[in-house]
Image (tube, rainbow, N blue to C red):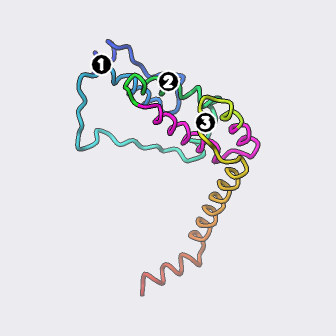
């Protein structure tokens, strides 16, 4: 309700461009007296961007540990353990490293090792790079095979059997 928003002064942060809706809810929850659970969704969240677009948004975050601080504060206000923020941080860091070049991965791991969440172990930069490239090559190969005329012909033949 708009009166609640005005009363507590909670607003979407314009400087946040990733998970800003989640942060908005975290900051609003302490002011709520009741929470209703509906069986059917009010809306369905659809993210129309491809993985590369999501990666570009992640690249805009200069320091992921600093970016996570408002989330940590919101969860702390609600009495939720910081483990949740650590899991979120690890997930975002891994996503950011997925499409990064090897030098970028090294830089991100070095930044991580100097940061607040340094106790969360990360694989060696070379392992991260090789694993992500292997997955990308496997995906390209699968797309190429499925797009080939041989695969489509074989699949059509099986439908008629």
Magenta part of the chain: 81-109
Pointer 2 or 1: first along the chain: 1
Q: Answer left or right for 87 relative to 117.
A: left
| Residue picked out by circle 3 | 119
Pointer 2 or 3: first along the chain: 2
Label 2 – label 1 distance at C-alpha: 23 Å
| Residue picked out by circle 2 | 70
Give yes or no for residue 142 being in the magenta stretch: no
Residue 8 or 147: which is nearer the viewer?
Answer: 8
Q: Position of residue 158 (x, y in %)?
A: 46, 83
Pointer 1 or 3: first along the chain: 1
Per the image, label 3 sits on a secondary structure element best described as loop
Q: Position of residue 58 (x, y in %)?
A: 59, 36
Label 2 – label 3 distance at C-alpha: 20 Å
Per the image, label 1 sits on a secondary structure element best described as helix
Label 1 – label 3 distance at C-alpha: 41 Å
Residue at the limit of the structure toward the front, as seen here:
119
Q: Position of residue 118 (x, y in %)?
A: 63, 34
Residue 15 or 156: which is nearer the viewer?
Answer: 15
Q: Residues within 10 Å of mark 1 (few under 14, many from 20)?
A: few
Which tag is nearer the camera, tag 2 or tag 3? 3
Residue at the limit of the structure toward the right, as seen here:
103
Per the image, label 2 sits on a secondary structure element best described as helix
Residue drawn at x 56%, y 76% as measured from the top left:
151
Q: Answer left or right for 61 relative to 130.
A: left
Residue drawn at x 48%, y 21% as measured from the top left:
13
| Residue picked out by circle 1 | 2
Main structural element of the magenta stretch: helix, strand or loop? helix
| Up/down of 68 relative to 130, above or below | above
């Amino acid at each position: 309700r708009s009166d609640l928003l005005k009363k507590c002064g909670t607003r979407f942060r314009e400087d946040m461009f990733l998970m800003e809706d989640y942060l908005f809810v975290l900051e609003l929850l302490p002011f709520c007296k009741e929470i209703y659970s509906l069986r059917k969704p009010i809306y369905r969240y659809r993210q129309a961007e491809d993985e590369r677009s999501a990666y570009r948004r992640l690249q805009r975050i200069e320091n992921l540990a600093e970016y996570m601080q408002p989330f940590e504060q919101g969860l702390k206000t609600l009495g939720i353990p910081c483990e949740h923020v650590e899991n979120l941080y690890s997930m975002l860091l891994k996503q950011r490293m997925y499409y990064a070049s090897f030098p970028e991965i090294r830089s991100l791991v070095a930044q991580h090792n100097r940061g607040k969440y340094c106790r969360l172990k990360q694989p060696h930069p070379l392992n991260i790079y090789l694993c992500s490239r292997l997955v990308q090559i496997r995906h390209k190969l699968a797309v190429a095979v499925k797009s080939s005329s041989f695969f489509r012909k074989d699949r059509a033949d099986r439908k008629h059997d």
